[in-house]
Amino acid sequence: MFGLGTPELVVILGIAFLIFGGKKLPEIGSGLGKAISSFKKGIHEVEETGTDMKNSLPGVKEATQVKETLDEVRSVTKLISK
């Protein structure tokens, strides 16, 4: 993901264990998990809102259909010209 391998993660977890202690690590992990989950839900809501807005604006749906048709024509044209 970020170029971190198993040895690096073990060192990071070891340092976190030394700093926070064994009792605090589960709380930190739980809080981090909840924060990531909340962030993903927020991103999903923003994507849904954008899709809803795109579909509700007049002419956007038609423009999207025209773009898809043009893309299909371009791909067919490329196949024919080869």
Image (tube, grey):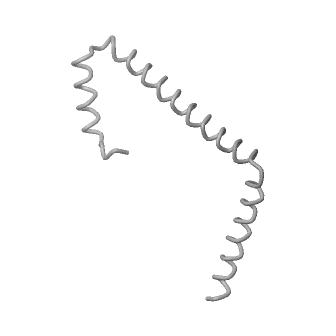
At x 74% / y 69%, what residue is drawn?
Answer: 69
Residue 68, image quadrant: bottom right
Is residue 48 placed above or below 81 in the rendered structure? above
The location of residue 24, given as percent across then percent down, is 33, 13
Picture coordinates of residue 54 (x, y %)?
A: 70, 47
On the picture, is 62 further left or further right than 42? Answer: right
Q: Is 28 situated above or below 68?
A: above
* Residue 71 image position (x, y, % from top left): 67, 70
- Image height of 38 relative to 74, above or below: above
Task: Provide residue 60's location: percent of width, then percent of height.
Answer: 73, 54
Question: Which image quadrant: the N terminus?
Answer: top left
Query: Hey, which residue is sitting farthest bottom in the picture?
Result: 81
Residue under the image location 40 percent in, 15 percent down: 27
Residue drawn at x 77%, y 55% is 59
Depth check: give the residue in front, 48 or 60: 60
> Which corner quadrant of the image does residue 21 belong to?
top left
Residue at the image point whose x is 71% and y is 41% from the top: 52
- Number of numbered discs visible in the structure rendering: 0
Q: Is residue 21 left or right of residue 29?
A: left
State which quarter of the image contains the C terminus.
bottom right
Residue most extreme to the front: 58
Is 25 left, or right, of 68 in this rendering? Answer: left
Between 7 and 64, which is closer to the camera in this rendering? Answer: 64
Does residue 4 lie above or below 10 as drawn? below
